[in-house]
Image (cartoon, rainbow, N blue to C red):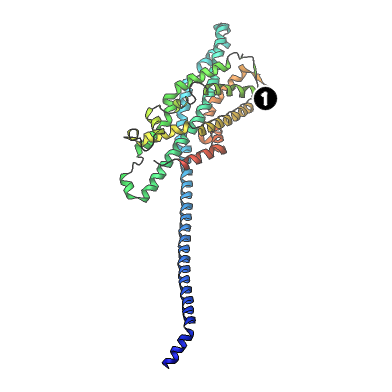
Amino acid sequence: MLSTLRDFWRRHRRKAFVTVGVLGSGYFLYKLYDAHRRKLADLERELADEREGERFIKAQMQAHFENIQRIADTTTLPYAMHHLSSRIAEELDLSQLLERLQNAKNQPNSLTHSEKIELWDRLKIISFTRMALSLWAMTMLSLYIRVQVNILGRHLYIDTARGFESSYFLENADMIDRDDEQKFLASADFLSNYGLPALMSDMQAAAAEILKGKQLKDFFNSTVLHETIRQILDRFMSIGSPHHWVSYIMPEDARFDRLATASSSDSKILFDVTKFDQLMAETGAVLTSAEFGSVVDISLKAVLDALVVDMGAQSGGSLTSGMPLAKLLSLVTQMGPLLLYEPSKNRFIQIIQSDPEVEIFFSLLYANMPPS
């Protein structure tokens, strides 16, 4: 029996070794395949979780972005616009000029011819100044506040996200406190409180230069009116340095300029920097960017186009064929307050906000603002 087994083993041992080898290799390959399959399944689950997380984050970002826009449109902008409207009406009051001209009409001998011409000339310049200034200030204030709120919203979102990720961050991070937040948003009133006198002086100088030589009897149609206002705005924007107008909107502070270009290694500059300083520095960097300059040009053009159309409609069609400048001035004086009307009912602000390029700019601003 034993010899039979040995003979059987001798005859078939090669086959046995091959069989065992094949079975062993097959089992090994199966284990490798099973391990690989499990890893792929785990990787697919991780990728699915990441995609779900990304979708959730994008949805949260979108909801937060829309909420930030509502804050700007319903709270910050209406208050700032009302304040600006009151200040412009106060500083560029036409009532005394109109009263003197009316008295001169009722009492022809109360003023000399040269005095009447001087009053009409002042009315011409101040009327166009008020309209151009209202157009520019409304446009810039609405854009500035949206820049502010998007920057602030981005920082608050990052702070909140980090806070969820780490309790250590909540205890140690330099998060935006309520005082810095309120101080930052309150800077929207800088134009009304501090920047308006210089803005008014420069706009009036631009208007006087463009209107020089234009007589009260000259006929203005829609094209001439559009070109005149555009020239006043272009002349105003060309005064001084390329970004001189930023000083009308936000305070000048050397710290903000240094912070805007500072790197993380500039310890001397970054030392003792508040969140308010950082927010203002980022705002200044946006306002002086080429991208924002394009948004300003687009917005001013869109508002000017709509303004001339509205003035044509209010003239009953007379502006299409043309009317004397003296008659046009009454229409010009009416448009300034309409440009600064309640934001929720202000079609000029809605035109700015609904422009596709403006929407894209602010979407990118909110999404791409680098974290602190």
Give the residue displayed 48% in from the left and 60% down from the top: 44
Q: Quadrant of the N terminus?
A: bottom left
Residue occupying the point 34% across, 33% down = 269
- Is the C terminus in the top left, top right, bottom left or bottom right quadrant? top left
User: Which of 116/72 is in front?
Assistant: 72
Mark yes or no: residue 236 visible: yes
Where residue 114 sits in the image (x, y, percent)?
Answer: 56, 7
Residue 260 drawn at (x, y percent): 41, 33
Percent across and percent down for residue 97 are: 52, 15
Q: Is residue 172 left or right of residue 157?
A: left
Mark 1 closeness class: few <14, some 14–19, many ≥20 residues within 10 Å: some
The residue singled out by tag 1 in the image is 320
Q: Nearer the viewer, residue 364 or 72?
A: 364
| Residue located farthest toward the right when viewing the structure as drawn | 321
Could you tell whether 286 is left or right of 266 in the image? right
Q: Residue at horizontal 52%, vertical 27%?
A: 136
269 with respect to 141 (left or right): left
Residue 328: percent from the left, percent from the top? 61, 20
Q: Is residue 68 above or below residue 140?
A: below
Label 1: state its secondary structure. Answer: helix
Left or right of 234? Residue 266 is left
Residue type at mark 1: give it. Thr
